[in-house]
Image (spheres, rainbow, N blue to C red):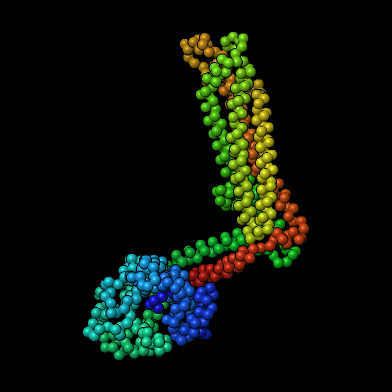
């Protein structure tokens, strides 16, 4: 229909019986009946169906990107899918939006750019083909011309004496197309108003070309009449499908894999029989628990998203903790002499130069080590958030479609996280309280001290000057650096071990034990296993799609 304001899809299929199948959602039921009545009269999309257009595209003469699909099954139709697109408008009429032309072009481009379609450029015989906008758009979408076929209409309106120009176009002598041109004579508005049937219209069309001296040869060449166009389109479509068969087969395989993954994520659904529900829930909990264990110990037995590999994520945080200790050590080493000098100046009593005051050493060492407590607690909080997020995401994967069960499990995840984080925080604080007892095994301290003293040795001519000026400061700095290295190495392992124990190992273990308690009580289980209606419908839809895709793959392998 020339004044259509949306895309109209017409699927024709050979069948002994005649069926007309319309979408349930649009147009409304009353308008479907109108559409069916007009189809039975031989008018697929009737002019009197303006209310259908208003439903689809509104009453302001706008354009809709929605597609209305009509399936026609009959014994005398080819297997084709045709999409009739709106005609190109150049000027907004009445209440139409000012950019109506751009809207229509955008809609047309969305269809003709698809490489598996064949584009029919419909051009009236009584217009200048060289200035046709539709032909220009088709050439832009299909530069090679392998998918474009020109269809000339209204040959009965050609002025006397200009018929030869139409023949030149059809012979590809004006604007050449790889697939050439064909010509048809459709029903006029008067024929439609008179309710001329399709059968009668086809007979009149054939008679028109037979009786025309100039156009008769086109009929013989099978480039004229709607029936010839239908036969040509079927052939072209088969050839196009064969050409794109490898791509189609690959897309079908990808769709099968994608649909299978979606079904796997949804699961098999809750069993109807009561005796099957306990094993179903056990399998769900077992699968979730296995993934919990794998993720928290870093054994990835299947493919996980990178942000789900919590052990790897946490290991990176531990690496940052080690880097922080190294940076703090470097910073402390740079300011250590100044701190020792200032502290000694304030606290030195009766000691002679060269004697190290242990109280000064202990106080400076404790102060530096305790600066590490706040960043360790910050890391604890960050990792707790990450672990909880992974546990929640994993639960959503395993218990999708079971809102009551999901709510219960998320509540347990939150509760256990809070307890485990408090336990870990208490342990870290205890650890740093213990670090206030400046301590190291004698053999460990001595070995590290000898190593640091070697690094501090200077050329012999400089030694006397240093000893005479600040022997005690140098000695104190050596001891501080020695102890800080020992303490930071200890914390580099102990802090991550505490976090790993409480927030990975114990967190997962306690959550698994809590989940097993869900198996108790039939009434509670019934409530937990209530499935969302949307999930049920989606699973049924995906199963149906998978069945169709597998059938399509089977057919493709036979082509």
Q: Name the image quarter holding the N terminus.
A: bottom left
Residue 98 image position (x, y, % from top left): 36, 67
* Residue 468 visible: yes
Residue 444 image position (x, y, % from top left): 63, 24
In the picture, measured across the screen, residue 45 lies left or right of residue 133, that is right
Find residue 200 and report its image quarter: bottom left
Q: Residue at point 40% right, 68% down?
A: 107
Q: Residue at point 63% right, 17% down?
A: 358
Q: Residue furthest left?
A: 161
Numbered label tally: 0
In the picture, measured across the screen, residue 174 lies left or right of residue 74, that is left
In the picture, measured across the screen, residue 169 lies left or right of residue 33, that is left
| 285 over 493 or under it: above or below | below
* Residue 13 visible: no
Find residue 533 and report its image quarter: bottom right
Residue 269 image position (x, y, % from top left): 65, 63
Q: Residue furthest front?
A: 95
The foreground one among 361 and 475 is 361
| 373 over 391 or under it: above or below | above
Q: Residue furthest right?
A: 521
Find residue 94 and report its image quarter: bottom left
| 176 over 211 or under it: above or below | above
In the picture, measured across the screen, residue 240 lies left or right of residue 155, that is right
Q: Residue at point 60% right, 34% down?
A: 374
Residue 285 image position (x, y, % from top left): 69, 55
Q: Residue at point 72% right, 49% down?
A: 513
């Amino acid at each position: 229909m020339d004044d259509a304001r949306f895309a109209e899809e017409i699927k024709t299929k050979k069948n002994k019986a005649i069926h007309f199948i319309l979408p349930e959602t649009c147009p409304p039921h009353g308008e479907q009946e109108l559409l069916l009545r007009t189809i039975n009269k031989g008018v697929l999309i009737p002019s009197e169906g303006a209310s259908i257009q208003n439903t689809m595209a509104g009453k302001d003469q706008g354009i809709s990107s929605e597609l209305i699909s009509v399936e026609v099954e009959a014994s005398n139709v080819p297997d084709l899918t045709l999409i009739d697109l709106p005609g190109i408008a150049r000027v907004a009429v009445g209440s139409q939006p000012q950019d109506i032309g751009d809207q229509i072009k955008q809609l047309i481009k969305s269809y003709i750019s698809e490489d598996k379609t064949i584009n029919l450029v419909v051009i009236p015989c009584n217009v200048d083909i060289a200035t046709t906008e539709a032909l220009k758009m088709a050439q832009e979408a299909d530069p090679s011309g392998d998918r474009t076929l020109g269809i000339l209409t209204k040959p009965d309106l050609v002025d006397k004496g200009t018929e030869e120009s139409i023949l030149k176009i059809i012979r590809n002598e004006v604007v050449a197309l790889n697939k050439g041109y064909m010509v048809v004579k459709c029903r006029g508005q008067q024929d439609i108003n008179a309710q001329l049937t399709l059968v009668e219209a086809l007979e009149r069309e054939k008679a028109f070309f037979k009786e025309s001296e100039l156009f008769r040869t086109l009929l013989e060449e099978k480039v004229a009449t709607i029936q010839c166009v239908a036969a040509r389109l079927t052939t072209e479509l088969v050839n196009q499908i064969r050409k794109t068969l490898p791509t189609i087969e690959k897309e079908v395989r990808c769709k099968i894999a994608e649909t299978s993954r979606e079904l796997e994520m949804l699961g098999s659904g809750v069993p109807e029989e009561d005796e099957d529900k306990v094993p179903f829930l056990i399998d769900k909990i077992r699968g979730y628990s296995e993934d919990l264990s794998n993720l928290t110990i870093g054994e990835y037995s299947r493919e996980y998203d990178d942000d789900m590999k919590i052990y790897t994520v946490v290991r990176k945080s531990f690496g940052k903790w080690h880097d922080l200790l190294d940076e703090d050590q470097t910073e402390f080493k740079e300011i250590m002499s100044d701190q020792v000098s200032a502290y000694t100046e304030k606290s030195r009593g009766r000691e002679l130069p060269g004697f190290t005051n242990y109280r000064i050493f202990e106080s400076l060492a404790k102060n530096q080590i305790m600066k590490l407590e706040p960043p360790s607690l910050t890391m604890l909080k960050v990792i707790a958030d990450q672990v909880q997020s992974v546990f929640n995401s994993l639960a959503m994967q395993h218990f999708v479609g079971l809102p009551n069960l999901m709510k219960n499990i998320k509540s347990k995840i939150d509760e256990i996280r809070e307890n485990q984080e408090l336990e870990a925080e208490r342990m870290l604080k205890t650890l740093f309280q213990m670090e206030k007892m400046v301590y190291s095994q004698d053999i460990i301290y001595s070995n590290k001290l000898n190593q640091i003293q070697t690094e501090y040795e200077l050329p012999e001519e400089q030694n006397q000057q240093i000893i005479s000026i600040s022997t005690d400061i140098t000695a104190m700095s050596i001891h501080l650096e020695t102890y800080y290295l020992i303490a930071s190495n200890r914390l580099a392992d102990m802090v991550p071990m505490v976090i790993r124990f409480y927030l990975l190992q114990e967190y997962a273990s306690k959550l698994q034990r809590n989940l097993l308690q869900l198996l108790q009580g039939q009434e509670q289980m019934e409530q937990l296993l209530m499935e969302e209606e949307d999930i049920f419908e989606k699973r049924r839809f995906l199963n149906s799609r998978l069945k169709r895709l597998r059938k399509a793959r089977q057919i493709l392998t036979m082509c």
